[in-house]
Image (tube, grey):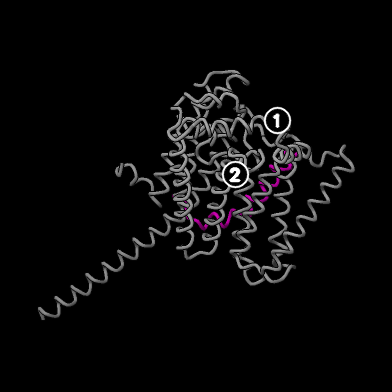
Amino acid sequence: MKEYLKYLKGDRVIWIITLLMLAFSLVSVYSFVPILVKTAGGTPFKYLFKHFTYVVLAFLAMFWLHKKDPKYFFQISKFGYYLSICILIFTFFFGVKVNDAGRWVQIPFVGLTFQASDFAKLALILTISRLLVVKKDLLNQWRGGLGTLIFPIVVICGLILKDNFSTSALLFLICFILLFVGKVPFLKLLSIVGGCIALLLVVIGLHVLAPKLELLPRFDTWMHRIGSMSDGENELVANAQAMNAKLAIYNGGVFGQGVGDGKLKEYLPEAYADFYYSSYVEEFGSISSVILVFLYLILLYRIFQIGLQSASMFETYLCIGIGVLLLTQASVNMLVCTGIFPVTGQNMPLLAMGGSALIMTCVALGLVQSIANKKNKGKEEHSVGQTDTIENELNSTNGSREN
């Protein structure tokens, strides 16, 4: 194992957890796709091969990025922000619709799709991390300071909101945490939250008054999902997938039903993605679910540790943003499956089937590993310098004695 890990620089714990999860995802996805075979056709092996392709691409992206200097991420963050806006606008008009949501962009010639918001999330975290450094002396004023941070948040979250409220809300929460860590005055943060809520209410009002504009085409779906949580009688009929998710967790027990032996996964529309946690507990049990949570917490701890030990504030903000992003996605998937949150589309990082989500998660981890690699190189150079100094002192001492 050590022979292969020597080629993987940065934090070895993150590498081990990432590789373990990617390998395990091949087993779980192959086991969880029967519902997809029923609804979309094909064979389990077809989807396994497709997922394996994405796993390889994701690992290669992470490996390539972890060897780069983090200073380049600072420089290209602006380009990434503008590119994400272009992709989101393109998706707004020409996106491929799945479940009445136009979140996907079709890649020409290869027949694959990717979710535009997956790229936009990381691009926005990079942008906010850079602006917190550039505008650090102007965070107490709106014009030329805090306003330049709020604008990209409103633009990106607003473009995502149309078809994906949960992702937009989570991304706003992550940005809010970054602003808080970046020492934006608390009253300013409250003003930002109040302003964004007011803007959202205006958009909802316009949608209700002029539904033909289709400002929020999934608004009725959101209200239905929220309402089904509070209406227990209606939940049994209208929100059967949430009920099946909780039953799958119950059916898993302590040790699970075994790989491939889960039954309720065949009735969950997104057993391999949005309801991954339910399928996982059904087949691997509650003990394995505790281990899974523990692995995510270790991953979060290592990412935060790398960020907090960095001498660059940009790198610190970036690691915090990426760590919170991964944790919130995993947490929401678990909370949805246990019935605490309404049904929404957040899959399990590194485990669920999904091309763009998996690749962008590994890209984000590649950025973190690049920062860790830079830190380790600094330690090695410092250690070599100290060794050279000691050797020089010993040589000079020996020379003095000979004289």
Q: Is residue 91 magenta?
A: yes
Q: Residue furthest left?
A: 402
Instruction: Determine crowd level at label 1: few under 14, some 14-19, many 20+ residues with C-alpha closer than 10 A.
Output: few
List x then y, in percent, for residue 238.
72, 30
In the picture, the disc for residue 99 is 1
Name the residue at 68% across, 47% down. Answer: 168
Amino acid marked by disc 1: Asn
Q: Amino acid at mark 2?
A: Val
Q: Residue at x 68, y 61 (%)?
A: 149
Distance from label 1 to label 2 (Cα)? 20 Å
Q: Which numbered dot is residue 332?
A: 2
Residue 314: quarter of image: bottom right
Does residue 54 appear left or right of residue 222 in this picture? left
| Residue 268 percent coordinates (x, y) | 60, 28
* Percent of width and height locating residue 364: 53, 48
Give the residues in magenta.
Answer: 67-92
Q: In the visual, does 1 lie left or right of 250?
A: left
Main structural element of the magenta stretch: helix, strand or loop? Answer: helix
> Which quadrant holds residue 290?
top left
Does 10 appear above or below 62? Answer: below
Looking at the rendered structure, which numbered label has been put on residue 66? none
